[in-house]
Image (spheres, grey):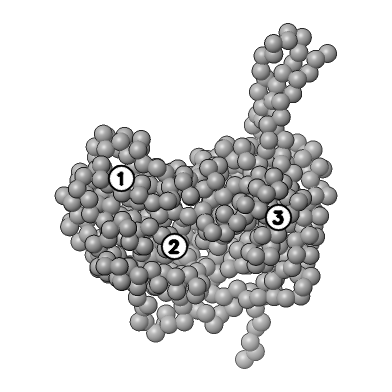
Amino acid sequence: MTNIPPPVYDNYINGEWRNSESGRTQKSINPANKNEIVGIIPDSSKQDLEDAVAAAKAVRLAWRKLAGTDRGNLLFKAADIMESRTNEIGEAMTLEMGKTLPEAKGETARGVAILRYYAGEGMRKIGDVIPSSDAAAFLYTTRSPLGTVGVISPWNFPVAIPVWKLAPALIYGNSVVWKPATETAVTAAKVMQCFHDAGFPAGVLNMVVGSGSVIGQGIAEHADINGVTFTGSNAVGQAVGQAALSRGAKYQLEMGGKNPIIIAADADVDLAVEATISGGLRSTGQKCTATSRVIVVKDVYEEFKSKLVQKVAELKVGNGLNGQTWLGPCANEKQMETVLSYIRKGVEEGAVLLYGGTRPTDSDLSDGFYVTPAIFDKVTSTMSIAQEEIFGPVLTLIEVNDMQEAIELANDTKYGLSASIYTRNIGNALQFVQEVEAGLVRVNAETAGVELQAPFGGMKQSSSHSREQGQAAIEFYTSIKTVFIKP
């Protein structure tokens, strides 16, 4: 039997698929089976980035001169094409980063919805008429695109996150250079093909695959990139922001989270358990909005803990293509080792491992990067597992005396991305909404749940204090221009 070589994927520059100038390649590996190569992808050089930026710069004036409706029509076409390829893109995502196929297809559908939402933005107003102190003058505002925008996207949502950056950048008249995560570069290529097939002009949208130290940092430092939008870790995000700031470029950072869910004494415990599991363990906990700290008032602590362990024990860990699987592998070996190291650290610091936190013993999972979902008891707020982002299937239970203590502990972290509470008491809910330090606040819902039409972003060290998605996106991708006209 002849072995079929894995498919090869290239960069997309100036409307063409191109090999890397360096000639170097790397492998995209299936985290469910480390011996399976999903595709061969570029290991690009600075020259590839230079070519992409030059292409974007050359076309940006022509692109911004198009009517918003014309740009929107192209986004509508890309959405239709992506929708027709939902199965193909979803399967590529599952193969590359491990999330279950239903989740991957759902994310692709969300990408379609985002494209259609921003396509409609081409018909919305972009300014206001303002009364002038000069009766003979006409005073108004309009908006100008930044020029060329650099997009640096992560592997955990390889369709939704890049699309919610690409779509507003494009509809508001910017050209784009996109660096997807290497772990999901095959998925990115399939997304890029949708834009190509929709007929976007050459140079308007370019994709360069390579290391963060070369391509990512190169985008942040490039003099011809006018704005940089980044989602990823705090350490890398801070470096990107500093590089952009040093040359006066606009930047937007969405980084880590250590998201709390509070279970009040009057909560519906069964619903709270479901939300904790869904928010904390779907996508193998690899969400910036994933539930990590479970803060439970003592009155319901034992009941909640018992039901949580029982429900988590029922979850099936396995290959995301298997229809019975609930929890897939970690996205790569490095992430698996990080998760396991935090589990060891939790035990060393005195927390009690109630359930999971080990490699599965099933022989058919031995070649994958699997970790069984972990639940820790007796956690204090000073422990590493209660303060540092793990980005894996780990839940930490913290018992508190009352709501005031719960909110204080919810805020006891450098992060401030999302937070939720389960309660039947309107007073508890209003106090939580007012006092919790998070950019996304949810009542009787899990911490992970971002709606595309609403602003999204964090407080404290979770973001650069800007907002993505919804109509708030225009604030980053454009600048206000005030116009005074006198005959």
User: What residue is shown at x 61% (from left), y 44% (from top)?
Assistant: 116
Estimate the x, y position of residue 424 in percent, counting from the top left.
Answer: 24, 40
CB within 8 Å, label 2 to label 1: no
Amino acid type at circle 3 is: Glu
The residue identified by callout 3 is 221
For the residue labelled by badge 1, is the local secondary structure a helix, a strand or a loop?
A: helix
Q: Which mark is residue 28?
A: none
Find numbered disc 3 in the image and state the secondary structure of the residue it sits on.
helix
Q: Residue placed at 79% from the left, 45% from the top?
A: 60
Distance Cα–Cα, label 2 vs label 1: 23 Å
Residue in view at x 62 percent, y 38 percent: 474
Kind of residue indicated by mark 1? Glu
Q: CA distance from mark 1 to mark 3?
A: 39 Å
Can you identify the residue that label 2 sits on?
Answer: 391
- Position of 458 with respect to 441 (left or right) is right
Eyeballing the image, is 437 above or below 124?
A: below
Badges 2 and 3: C-beta atoms under 8 Å apart? no
Of residues 260 and 201, the one nearer the viewer is 260
Q: Earlier in the sequence, mark 1 or mark 3?
A: 3
Residue 408: mark in rendering: 1
Residue extending furthest toward the top:
135
Element type where label 2 sits in the image: loop
Mark 3 surroundings: few (<14), some (14-19) or many (≥20) residues within 10 A: many
- The amino acid type of the residue labelled 2 equals Phe
Q: Residues within 10 Å of mark 1 (few under 14, many from 20)?
A: few
The answer to whether residue 389 is above or below residue 454 is: below
